[in-house]
Amino acid sequence: ETDPRLQRAVARMIPRLEQRTGIALSHVVASDSIGATLLIDCDGPGEKIQGIDEDESYSIESDSHSITLHAATTVGVIRGLETVLQLVDADAHHYFVPGVSINDVPRFRWRGLLIDVSRHFEPVSEVERTLDGMAAVKLNVLHWHLSDDQGIRVESRRYPRLQKLSSDSLYYTQAQVREVVAYARDRGIRVVPEFDMPGHSTAWFVAYPQYASAPGPYSIARNWSGSPAVFDPTRESVYRFINGFIGEMSTLFPDAYWHIGGDEVNATQWKQSARIQKFMAAHHLADNAALQAYFNQRLSRILISHHKRMIGWDEILHPDLPRTTVVQSWRGTQYLGQAAAQGFSGILSAPYYLDAMKAAEQHYLADPLAGDSTLTPDEISRVLGGEACMWAELVSQGSIDSRIWPRLAAIAERFWSPRSVTDVADMYRRLAIENARLEQFGLGQESHTDRYLRRIMNGPDIAPLSELLKLAEPVTLGQRTHTVTVTQLTPLVQIVDAARPDPPDRWRILQLVREYVSSPSTSVAQHDTLMHWFSEWRDLDPRVHDAAKRSPLAQAALPAADALASVGTIGLAALEARKSGMPLSKAWTDSAVVTLTAADKPQGLLHLVVVPAVRQLLQ
Ligand code: ACM
């Protein structure tokens, strides 16, 4: 008798293996091992509600006859099946799994992704696709940021004004929440809901202004400027409301943890309320942090009564909270250590903000527990892991895949694999393969740019823009919002939205330059390829200008195209000088450095990713 969840995992795996190989396979799972080519040996189903101590380990033995996958739990089998699929290799005539002996276990127990569906909503289909990708890279927590100033995204039967007034009709029904939670569980993924309070909470007060710290009315926030609306910690009615809400929601979200947010509290309303100031004095609450700590302790007691453990952003760190509380560090790695030192468990997010538009390499080399960590063994045991964060101020349903993937696969490896696994070149080699594999779930990162460009150009003639966006990435949230006004109502269909973070050619070109510079005389192929690249950059500019004549949206590509042409011209001259042995004049080099520095700054809303490579060539 097997666990139905295990059967479903196998049933999902077989078609994927068929699609990879073109070989029709038996869909009938035999209950004995006679003649089996893939033998799955699972000791038991694992925890009824997956928790942080779930056993995810597995082992794989393969020889010329068969593969044996053993795990203590169904979740371990789910992890192992992903590895089996990754092991499938091919030569000219055969698909095969190489002979291996693998004993695998995750380094960290909490390996998550946050998706923010408040700033921009994501439908269930997108959430489920994301869960498919997460399972493929062995992540185990979906942190669902379901409320913020810009919307509350879950249906409440007890407080239906929430979805009526605070959601723009974009919310998950309770049936949909159950579906997503079950879908995640089938893939060995926990779902931790976040309902952010006391700040980031404007949307609640559109429906229920009486729980805010200042009289309403309130409207849904459309910008990202940090609304002053904040829950009133001094009113008993607020705690009754929150208790009612959590009581209702806790039946939808079975996970042991409940995320209260707690970040970036704007205390303006607290300071301006004579009543709240009087309450603080009466309760000896010295400052706003103390008032928030009071609120959190009340929240913590409510959560305990609903059998939930509290997790919150690092601002919640306070000695009076129960030590079952988990602190999520977003402002810096140091808060993880502070939490651990005070006896709290913690997870790290600060280096894993996907909206920061960093290269996969930077995320990959940021370790939740760096080798030089000064934490004691006891403190280290309280570091549960990490979470990548996909904040959605500038991310919509159409673009979210392109922002999450493929960089998340590199972060997932950081959370799973030993600290010593840090070969960036090998990471990028494998990331490209994994990125292609992720497309099997319908994830759109690879098709994203051209799809957006076809819309921008209203047809298939996108070549110049497509070539440009292989070399340029979006600027960061801060750079964009300081340059233009962009609200929740702005269509995210610009050239910058078509661009992808860390386009693969950045790394390719950097490697070419490194190889060439290390040995110019023997690097003829690298020289010729770089020549070709740089000429293309120079010649791309008039073609982009031509395209922009047919599309107002395409005008935004011009500054980057112009800058790229100057970078290409400098690259050609540097290459020529190296080859001929004729040094460039100091005046020319100085001026080239100035040009490169300028080209490395935002060009409109794009950032060229190739300048460091050309700078290396010039040096
Ligand atoms: C956060 O980024 N405010 C958690």
Image (cartoon, helix red, strand yellow):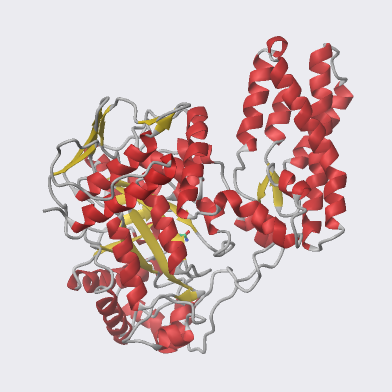
Nearest the eye: 210 or 488: 488
Q: Residue at x 54, y 54 (%)?
A: 444
Q: Position of residue 581 (x, y in %)?
A: 82, 11
Q: Is residue 421 left or right of residue 468?
A: left
Q: Position of residue 446 (x, y in %)?
A: 58, 48
Which quadrant of the structure image shows residue 594?
top right
Q: Is residue 336 left or right of residue 397?
A: left
Q: Is residue 78 above or below residue 93?
A: below
Q: Residue at x 84, y 32 (%)?
A: 569
Nearest the eye: 23 or 346: 23
Instruction: Please indicate, yes or no, whether residue 368 appears anywhere in the rendered image.
Output: no
How many badges with numbers are in the image? 0
Q: Position of residue 69 (x, y in %)?
A: 22, 37
Q: Residue at x 22, y 56 (%)?
A: 5
Q: Indicate the quadrant containing the C terminus: top left, top right, bottom left or bottom right.
A: top right
Q: Position of residue 530 (x, y in %)?
A: 74, 26
Nearest the eye: 344 or 397: 397
Q: Is residue 512 above or below residue 166?
A: above
Instruction: Please indicate, yes or no, whether residue 86 appears anywhere in the rendered image.
Output: yes
Q: Is residue 598 left or right of residue 3?
A: right
Nearest the eye: 1 or 540: 1
